């Protein structure tokens, strides 16, 4: 079932943020069938840099492709501001769709963008974002590929401006709306009440601007998709720190996965099966 079909059927979606094929496999094996490819996570793991528009289109689309090849999960991919002007937005949509994404998130920040839960974000005029949404819709090859419109206007310009932008983005053809970083439950409920019946994204970032709620509470509010972009990245960071601290004190810990668990995750059995299947076969190139 496509993401579009899941949303039309009224399904609620919890999507952990993944940033490489390894994290995507872990999430899929844990039972998550929709994953969010996080720009924050790709900037951090590929470049060791903050989420401030450092990862290029080529680097992001490469991550989308490698994650798509490693998992059967539905993929929502962070497209930032589209990596340039309108022609760049079109290329980004075409590339993400061809790479295996099922939806792209585009935001109305100025370039270079900033993480939606950090300071110094500026937004472009509404008319410019409407053009981006129009080009994005025209550039996709299938209507099953969804365009998610995100506005970052709330923090600097307030809830009324953010709702006005979201309304115009919906009229321009956005399939899903994402009003970033509401700072209170009141704002979150107002977003859901204003766009009742429209697929909405809630973004849960520990330590960020938005209050943290259980996904079930957010679904009851009216959100249909809840993303957790840095949850696995934060878990990996803390886990590596703890493992290294433990290693420095007592050596190896039994809390760390062993090679057999890693081999199972990475499907090494497929390699061994091929070895056994063709063991003894004539080598025609020798």
Image (cartoon, rainbow, N blue to C red):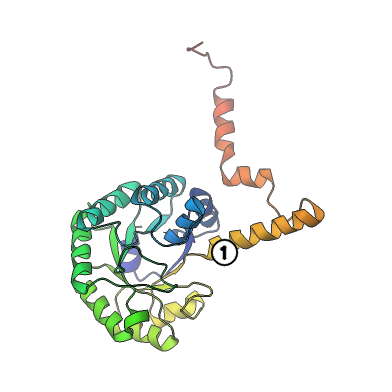
**Observer-nearest of 156 and 106:** 156
**Observer-nearest of 190 and 261:** 190
* Image coords of residue 179 (percent x, y): 34, 76
Residue 168 appears anywhere in the view:
yes
Residue 37 appears anywhere in the view:
no
* Image coords of residue 42 (percent x, y): 46, 55
Q: List the single residue furthest toward the right.
A: 250
Which residue shows up at 54% across the image and 29% down it?
A: 274
Q: Which residue is mark 1?
A: 234
- In the rendered image, which quarter contains the N terminus? bottom left
**Observer-nearest of 254 and 114:** 114
Q: Is residue 111 above or below residue 72?
A: below
Left or right: residue 140 versus residue 79 is left
Which residue shows up at 39% across the image and 73% down it?
A: 120
Q: Is residue 151 above or below residue 235?
A: below
Query: Label 1 crowding class (10 Å Cα cut-off): few <14, some 14-19, many 20+?
Result: few
**Observer-nearest of 29 and 69:** 69
* Image coords of residue 58 (percent x, y): 35, 47
Left or right: residue 174 versus residue 256 is left
Count the labels in the image.
Answer: 1
């Amino acid at each position: 079932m496509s993401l579009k079909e899941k949303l039309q059927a009224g399904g609620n979606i919890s999507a952990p943020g993944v940033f490489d094929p390894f994290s995507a496999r872990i999430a899929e094996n844990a039972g998550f069938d929709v994953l969010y490819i996080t720009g924050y996570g790709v900037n951090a793991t590929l470049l060791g840099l903050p989420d401030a528009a450092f990862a290029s289109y080529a680097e992001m689309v490469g991550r989308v492709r490698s994650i798509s090849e490693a998992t059967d999960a539905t993929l929502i991919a962070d497209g930032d501001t589209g990596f340039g002007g309108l022609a760049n937005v079109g290329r980004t949509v075409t590339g993400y769709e061809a790479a295996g994404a099922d939806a792209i998130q585009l935001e109305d920040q100025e370039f270079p963008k900033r993480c939606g839960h950090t300071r110094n974000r500026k937004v472009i005029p509404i008319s410019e974002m409407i053009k981006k949404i129009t080009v994005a819709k025209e550039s996709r090859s299938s209507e099953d590929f969804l365009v998610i419109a995100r506005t970052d206007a709330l923090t600097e310009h307030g809830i009324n401006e953010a709702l006005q932008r979201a309304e115009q983005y919906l009229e321009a053809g956005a399939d899903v709306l994402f009003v970033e970083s509401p700072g209170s439950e009141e704002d979150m409920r107002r977003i859901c009440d204003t766009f009742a019946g429209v697929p909405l994204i809630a973004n849960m970032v520990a330590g960020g601007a938005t209050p943290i709620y259980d996904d079930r509470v957010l679904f009851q509010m009216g959100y249909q998709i809840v993303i957790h972009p840095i949850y696995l990245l934060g878990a990996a960071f803390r886990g590596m720190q703890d493992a290294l601290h433990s290693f420095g004190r007592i050596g190896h810990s039994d809390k760390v996965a062993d090679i057999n668990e890693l081999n199972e995750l990475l499907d090494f059995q497929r390699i061994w099966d091929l070895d056994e299947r063709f063991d003894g076969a004539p080598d025609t190139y020798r």
